[in-house]
Image (cartoon, rainbow, N blue to C red):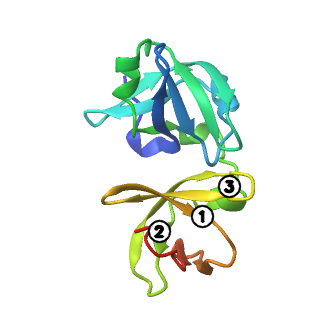
Amino acid sequence: MHPDPDNLLQIAKVLKSNGTRGELLMSFPQVDPEDMLENGPVFIMFDGLPVPFYLEQVTPKGPVKALVKLEGVDSYEDAEEMVGQAVYAPADLFEPEEAKGPEALLGWTLADENGQALGTVEDYEDIPGNPCLYIHTEKGQTMLPLHEDLILDLDESRKILRMRIPEGLF
């Protein structure tokens, strides 16, 4: 029996496969991935139905990412089928942590100086001296430096980040 999809909360996203044993790099912007080891299965949608997967191992990789090994995902090919998928958990298991710092921008719309939407903030990487956002656009993914001098406006109610975009990035 599958859980009610309306009772599922997105907790992560599969960013890429890693290695040959079926490991996945996931982004967990609002939950501690290690908590998921004790909370039962996570769910990934296939053909519109939530399919359960138990976490075998979680290795944190920075503040919001983790290398995850799921039961039953044992090869590179299996892992590749999951890249880009959203990962869900029952909403009543836990309350998500409030995202902190730049992680709070995940899922926001990025707009240019004129307010034109350019894409969605998909990930954040804290490169020393040069923190960056990964922006998902129609043409793929673009890396954008996150510097306070480039930020023009943060509209929290509409979740829009308006920035001065360095020439040539889009």
Classify 24 as above or below 4.
Answer: above
Task: Give x and y (percent) for residue 48.
Answer: 28, 37
**In the drawing, does residue 63 fall left or right of residue 82?**
right
Task: Give x and y (percent) for residue 112.
Answer: 46, 79
Classify 115 as above or below 160.
Answer: below
Task: Give x and y (percent) for residue 46.
Answer: 30, 31
Q: Which residue is mark 2?
A: 109
Q: Nearer the viewer, residue 18 or 170?
A: 170
Q: Quadrant of the C terminus?
A: bottom left
Q: Which residue is mark 3?
A: 99
Tell me which label, 2 or 3, sits earlier in the chain. 3
For badge 2, the amino acid type reads Thr
Front position among marks 1 and 3: 1
**In the drawing, does residue 146 fall left or right of residue 162?**
right
Q: Which residue is mark 1?
A: 145
For badge 1, the amino acid type reads Pro
**Spatial distance from mark 1 to mark 3, Cα to Cα?**
20 Å
Q: Secondary structure at mark 3?
A: loop
Task: Look at 62% across and 39% down and name the residue there.
Answer: 65
**Spatial distance from mark 2 to mark 3, Cα to Cα?**
16 Å
Q: Nearer the viewer, residue 135 or 56?
A: 135
Mark 2 Cα-neighbour bin, 10 Å: few <14, some 14–19, many ≥20: many
